[in-house]
Structures are given as C-alpha cells and as structure tokens.
Amino acid sequence: MIPGPFNYHRPTTVAEASRLLSTLGNEARPLAGGHSLIPMMKLRLATPEHLVDLQGIEGLRGIRREDSRIVVGAMTTQHDLLASSEIAESLPILHETALLIADPQVRYRGTIGGNVANGDPGNDMPALMMTLGAIYRLEGPTGTREVPAAEFYQGVYLTALEPGEILTSVSIPVPAAGHGYAYEKLKRKVGDYATAAAAVVLTMADGKVVSCAIGLTNLSEKPLLAKEAAQSVIGASLDEVTLKKAATAAQAIMSPAADARGPVEYRKHVGGVMVVRALQRAAGRTA
Ligand SMILES: Cc1cc2nc3c(=O)[nH]c(=O)nc-3n(C[C@H](O)[C@H](O)[C@H](O)COP(=O)(O)OP(=O)(O)OC[C@H]3O[C@@H](n4cnc5c(N)ncnc54)[C@H](O)[C@@H]3O)c2cc1C
C-alpha cells in the first residue's frame, strides 16, 4: 500500500511548526522519523491531510547534561542514544532499551520524541520514561509546559498533547550511582514489538532493596508503573517469595489485549516472568 495524498510542510522553528499544526487543525500531524506514522499511513490507519516535518527545526536534536539530569532533544534518534557515551555511563538502561527497539535501519530514523509521543502501548520508551521519572517538555500555541511521563499517557494513541503542541525534549533524572537496572523484553523475533516487557531501576544496601521503580510495556492499553509491585520489594532481599509477590502485584494491574502475540493469560504470565527477570538482573548489577 502507498499512503493517501497529503500536503508536506517543513518549518524551521518550533513556533512555526506549532502555528501550522494549530491552523491546519486535526488533519495535520507532526512527522519525526516516520517509522510509526508512515506505516500507519500506508495501511490507511492514519490519513492526515498535512504532515508537518520536524526535521528542519534546529536545536531539537542532541543530548546534554544539566546538573543531575540528562536532557534529550525530541528529534534525537535511537541510534544517537546508542552512540552517546553520556547515555551509556549515566543512563545505561536507556542504552539497553534503545538496543532492543526494532533493527538498525529503524533506529537510524526513529526518534525518542516520536517514540514517546506516539501513544502506542507497544513502544518501549514510554514505560521506561515513567520508571525513570522523566519529564516531557511540550511547546504549543499557548506556551510551554512540563508534564511528567507518568501523567502523559491516557489510552491507545491518547496522550496529554493538546492541539498544536509539540514535544520538544525529555528530561531524565540521573539515577543514583551504583543503581541496578534492567529492561527485559520478550518478543517473537528480532525486530518485533514486545509481547511483554518490564523496566526496573533499583538501589540496594546490605542485600536489601532501598528504592525501586518498575514499568511495564504492552501489558495494557497504556504503559504502566507497577507501584505496588515496586513497593512490595522495598526493605526485602530478592528471595523467591519476594519475587513471586512482586510478580503477582504487577500482574494484578496488567490488562493486555489478546492478539497475535498471544492470549491474555499467556501475556500476563510472561509479563510476570519479565518482572522477575528484570528485578533479578537489576539486583545483580548494583554496586
Ligand atoms: C519494523 C518496525 C519495528 C519496530 N519495532 C519497535 C519496537 O520494538 N519498539 C518500539 O518502541 N518501537 C518500534 N518501532 C517504532 C519506532 O521506534 C518508531 O520510530 C517510533 O515509534 C516513532 O518514532 P518516529 O520518530 O519514527 O515518529 P513518527 O513515526 O514520525 O511519529 C509517530 C507519532 O508521534 C507524533 N510525533 C512525532 N514526533 C513528535 C513530537 N516531537 N511531538 C509531538 N508529536 C510527535 C507523530 O505525529 C505520530 O503521531 C518499530 C518500527 C518499525 C517500522
């Protein structure tokens, strides 16, 4: 299939892009790497009349350190994330997750902004951003605002983005030195979206968990923070009973769709397995 007809716009500033999106209305969509939007257009699941390409806007791409946070511009590609020594050192879980997205061809074009703004529960970055406590910067016709990743997702392809707003950057607090981390993703084959995935960031002292956050990908119509599961391991060593308790608490909030990746019960089961594996691997990485 080829996409239906559309008008192409290439603004050079965020203000111009936002103005275009506001003026052109619901039939206009931002275009970033195009690796979610263009396939949707080819399948005629999306039929925007106007594409507002963000590639020509200077300053939207790049990774910089701001005190105890890493700020990633929306048009930074997944390949850029993988090539960054700052990310590898300060946010190794972001490096690990980017490497599990699709294949090198997709990662050369696909952007962090597109991945988190898309609203597809199959995208890997949203649950990770919630786990890390990231904040999204949105710029639109009425100004700029910051929205925590944990409050951004409302449903399938439904986010907190208002008409005319563009996500311009993602600001991520650097986790504590010596933290453990893991992104565990079950997929049917290399390059596939997750059947189930779990992100874990934790700290430990004297063999016990001091802090923990757990995120879940593709196990509901939106990415999830498994707060009770994370709470259940605090103060405990990650023995078999504790791991089982955490998996059960995480499974209680999962509501995956039955699809080509398996029936609901299977996906919840492997969701629990991903939580256990991620906790174990994260604990093994603490220093
Ligand atoms: C074969 C294949 C396999 C894939 N596998 C995975 C996978 O395993 N995991 C995964 O996470 N992803 C996967 N993807 C998707 C890929 O990571 C996409 O690149 C990503 O989801 C979207 O980023 P993009 O830059 O391509 O955005 P686009 O496709 O250009 O845009 C996606 C959506 O976000 C909106 N948008 C884009 N940028 C902004 C912005 N700055 N502000 C506001 N709205 C914006 C667009 O209007 C559109 O609605 C796969 C894609 C392909 C083709």
Image (cartoon, rainbow, N blue to C red):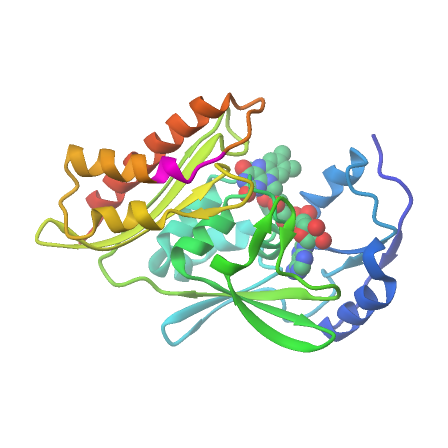
In depth, the one of 104 and 186 nearer the eye is 186
Which residues are drawn in magenta? 250-255
The C terminus, quarter of image: bottom left
Q: Residue at x 13, y 44 (%)?
A: 237
Q: Position of residue 243 (x, y in %)?
A: 22, 37
Quick check: can you spot residue 279? yes
**Snapshot quadrant of residue 45:** top right
Q: Quadrant of residue 174?
A: bottom left
Query: Is residue 109 visible in the rendered structure shown here?
Result: no
Which residue is painted at 60% across and 61% down in the image? Answer: 74
- Residue visible at 29% across and 49% down? 230
Which sits in the foreground, 250 or 73? 250
Q: Position of residue 56 (x, y in %)?
A: 74, 64
Task: Tell me what residue is drawn at x 48 percent, y 35 percent.
Answer: 255
- Find out whether residue 254 is within the magenta segment: yes
Is 244 situated above or below 91?
above
* Pick the front one: 213 or 99: 213
Residue 19 vs 89, above or below: the answer is below
Residue 7 lies, in percent from the top left, at 90, 54
* Quarter of the image where one finds residue 210: bottom left
Compared across the picture, whether 249 is left or right of 219 comes to: left
